[in-house]
């Protein structure tokens, strides 16, 4: 899903807030900020999250939803993240960009 207008777009170095649901290829959910009601916040492109996120979220608009399919080399590699993520796992993330540098989507004037 992409909003009709894109007021704020995510670029390298931006502080972004993202809701996500992480699944393995068999559909097993291993983590979800949606369920917690608490999106993750980090600096895009700075290595604070897995490489697949730093690359896959670039250019995303506030309010946009993206499905990311991340190979192990851009995720947790051959070692995985025991016990929830096996080594060599391909990861599927349903993501939604909540804000860029503290700016929410249009319609929520600050």
Image (cartoon, rainbow, N blue to C red):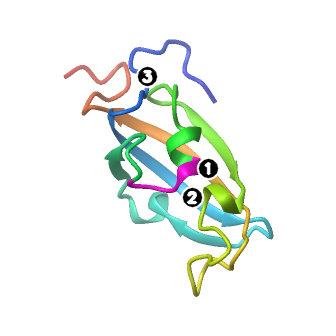
Q: CA distance from mark 3 to mark 1?
A: 18 Å
The vertical placement of 101 against 46, above or below, is: above
Q: Give yes or no for residue 50 being in the magenta stretch.
A: yes
Name the chief secondary structure element in magenta.
Answer: loop
Residue carrying label 2: 21
Q: Quadrant of the N terminus?
A: top right
The magenta span reads: 48-52
Q: Judging from the image, what secondary structure is the residue with disc 3 in?
A: loop
Distance of mark 2 from mark 1, alpha carbons? 5 Å
Q: Which residue shows up at 62% across the image and 54% down it? A: 93
**Which comes before the other along the chain, label 3 or label 1?**
3
Alpha-carbon neighbours of circle 2 within 10 Å: few (<14), some, or many (≥20)?
A: some
Callouts 3 and 1 close, C-beta under 8 Å: no
Residue at figure coordinates x 72%, y 56% from the top left: 71
Q: Position of residue 49 (x, y in %)?
A: 44, 55
The residue carrying pointer 3 sits among few (fewer than 14), some (14 to 19) or many (20 or more) residues within 10 Å by Cα, namely: some
Task: Identify the disc placed on residue 94.
Answer: 1
Residue at horizontal 38%, vertical 25%? 105
- Mark 2 residue element: strand
Mark 2 vs 1: CB contact within 8 A:
yes
Judged from this view, the residue extending furthest toward the left is: 110
User: Residue 35, percent across and down?
Assistant: 47, 64
Mark 3 — residue?
9
Q: In the rendering, at what x and y percent does residue 92 appear?
A: 69, 56
């Amino acid at each position: 899903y992409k909003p009709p207008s894109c007021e704020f777009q995510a670029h390298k170095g931006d502080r972004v807030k993202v809701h996500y649901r992480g699944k393995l290829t068999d559909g097993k959910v291993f983590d979800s900020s949606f369920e917690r009601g608490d999106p993750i916040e980090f600096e895009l492109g700075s290595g604070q999250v897995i490489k697949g996120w730093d690359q896959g979220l670039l250019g995303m608009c506030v309010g946009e939803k993206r499905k990311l399919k991340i190979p192990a080399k851009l995720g947790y590699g051959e070692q995985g993240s025991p016990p929830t993520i096996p080594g060599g796992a391909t990861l599927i993330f349903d993501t939604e960009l909540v804000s860029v540098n503290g700016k929410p989507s249009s319609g929520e004037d600050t």
